Image (tube, rainbow, N blue to C red):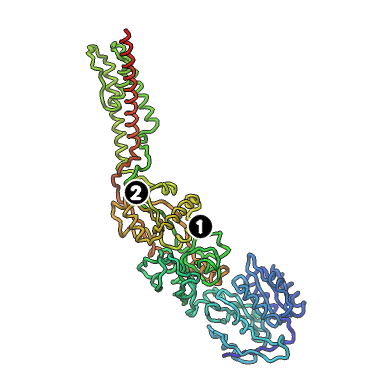
Amino acid sequence: MTTLWFNLPTVLGLDDNSMNLSVDYFVSIKTKYVCLLTCGKSNWNQKFAKRISNHNIAVSTVHISNRHKFDLNRIKICLKQTLLPIGVLINPQCPAFEDVMYYASQNLLFDRNHKWLINEENKVLRNDLTLVFNEKYVHFEDFNTTKVADNVDDVKIPIIDVLNNLNLSVDADITASITKDYWRYDLYEFFNFGKSRGGKYVIQNIGNWDINKGLTLTKTFKYYRRWNFQKMALKMIISGSVPLKENRNPYKITSLSVCSSMTPVPRVFHSEMLIGRIPDPGVAIISQTGAQLLHEIAGIHNFGYTYTVVDRWVGDYNRNHLYTATNGLYFREHDITPVLRFLPAHFSRYDVVFPTVTFIETRYYYRIPSYGIGKFENQFLRPLSTATWWCVVAVGALCGIVLMLSTIVEKRPITVNFALFSVLALICQQFFEEFEDIKRISSARKLTILVTGLSCLLIYNYYTSSVVSWLLNGPPPSINSLWELLDSPLQPVFQDTGYSYSWLQLPDYYYNKKNAKAEEVLKKRILNMKKKGNSIIIPVNEGIDLVRKGGYVYHTDVNSANSRISQTFTQRELCDLDSLNSMEKTLLYPCVQKRSPYREFFIWSLSRLMERGIIRCIQQRTWSHGVKCEGSSPRALALGGAAPAFILLAAGYILGTVIMLFERLKWKHDKSRLKHF
């Protein structure tokens, strides 16, 4: 236990040296606005404002001379930060000093955006203050600093005690100047690695000021000075896939909150499920990647994690509803989640940490159905372009005209029929003859038939080769939209993970807002299937196995699917496998509480990991690589694909039947006329 006594000055204002120190300090940290919280005579405030305004720094003053009657609204306005960080100069000798500090603590104003400077002029009666300050990590738990006074308002508590009772964290920017001599000051920073997490209260010397040399501050970056968290435990929240029984309260396992996806929610949890080199089947790869990066930071800075398991990532921020990862951040019960989508609509509830740690992409996986009529594909007109088809028509017409003229010259009994059916026969690689003994044969007709036959032969070969090539090498028929998927005979199932539950339970949650209407229809179908007792949420391994058997379409993330597919699918099955895009490739970020004291620290730490290639290394270690069909395999032509051929055949039969009926009617008509004669 350490006891500190401070002299109580009779004058509550600060001296000129304190003014010079304060001006030099705020100029050095490059702030553009200072909130002055002081008491006593106003001439000191006016001198300070005039002197610091020469450096283009604005000043707003609030008097805190009466602890029972100070204006909280004015203090709130004075401490309001908008764009740039602001400086705060407060006189600890003022009666309302403690009240202002507790107000700032309750409203999270001890952060990186508020640079606090406390000018302490009191003389220290004992000589152990330097010894206390020289200890790098000091945890002040019991201070016997109560001074007997005639009036409770006259009781002064040393600033060390006051600051120790505040909700400080690692991002606090509180500097106190302690008088060494009347012309020299030592500067100390006060912070805690996390008061609410049981962190250590730390006091460190960061510089000094004297009347001759001016201000000297350490140039070491803040978080290099606050490197070692002294084994403090932070809270991590894990998003699992199976709803917990009576899960009004989350299933807590340990402490810093990091959100991950566990499938299903484990009743026995250990950190190797997240950070182990061998992937755990119950942990989503995206969660494993984010958690491993956060554990790298924890190992570097000597802190640990405890965990809370919930059943999904995104909730409705209602305490009476299911507890989710975002709820844990919103209610400030957890500190960080390793992976969340960039959702601008939720930015008022939590903050995002940069840079990105991984990405997510989800797809609907299925094997191409080998049954059913299939999709209509008019490939029989595609081998030849429109211009080529018109050339075929022109050649056929020219051949028909020449043949018709030749039959007129030869005086054949039929002319038009001969020309028409001869052209059709040539196109179909056949020959037409009317079986009449005609001695005179035109050489023009022979030449025309020869040239036209050769042209048709070449066109026929080109045509058939193109169709056969399409059947052998063309891509298999695929589902190109979510609407086509809904029309298919495939039964949908979804991955047992947090975002699947969020998608089913939240009305405004979509995988892809471009497909919002189709997703609404699919969601209703899935919920109806669930009411009938069908299993619609299953783990990755079981879902991919269903896809392998056929008849199912499984929604999952690409990394999880690739890992299972590479282990189980044969080459033939890979060639039959196809997928439909659902959630486009989306970057994932760690997320923290709104105005979290750890946000700046994690941004700095992740940036360092990215610069050193550690993020990329862990991503390559955890990501799975896609597998593709090697070469190609002949495709089965479904009824839908062969529809043009069958349509042509049916049209020929119908036309032949109609012609036969007309011929029958004509024969009856001619026969009845002969009877009348």
Res 347 → quadrant: bottom right
The amino acid beneath tag 2 is Ile
Q: Earlier in the sequence, mark 1 or mark 2?
A: 2
User: Would you say residue 609 is visible in this rendering?
Assistant: no
Measured from the top left, where is residue 238 in percent x and y?
46, 69
Instruction: Tell me the quarter of the image containing the N terminus.
Output: bottom right
Quadrant into which the C terminus falls: top left
Which sits in the foreground, 483 or 190?
A: 483
Q: Position of residue 271 (x, y in %)?
A: 41, 73
Front in this rendered view, residue 674 or 309: 674
Q: Is residue 188 left or right of residue 410?
A: right
The numbered mark at residue 646 is: none
For label 2, the crowd category at 10 Å Cα-Cα, with few meaning under 14, some 14 to 19 and many 20 or more, is many
Q: Is residue 146 above or below residue 315?
A: below
Residue 622 visible somewhere in the drawing: yes
Q: Relative to 537, say whether 648 is above or below.
A: above
Question: Which residue is the extreme one toward the top?
Answer: 677
Label disc, if present, on residue 509 of the rendered structure: 1
Q: Which mark is residue 368?
A: 2
Amino acid of disc 1: Tyr
Label 1, secondary structure: give it.
loop
Q: On the rendered structure, is 249 left or right of 451? A: right
- Asked whether, in this view, residue 611 is left or right of residue 380, the answer is right
- Mark 1–mark 2 contact, CB under 8 Å? no
Give the vertical position of 217 relative to 387 (above or below). below
Q: Is residue 49 left or right of residue 266?
A: right
Residue 196 location (% of width, % of height):
55, 77
- Give the alpha-carbon distance from disc 1 to disc 2, as whole Å: 29 Å
Q: For the residue labelled by badge 2, is the local secondary structure a helix, a strand or a loop?
A: loop
Q: Nearer the viewer, residue 445 or 534?
A: 534
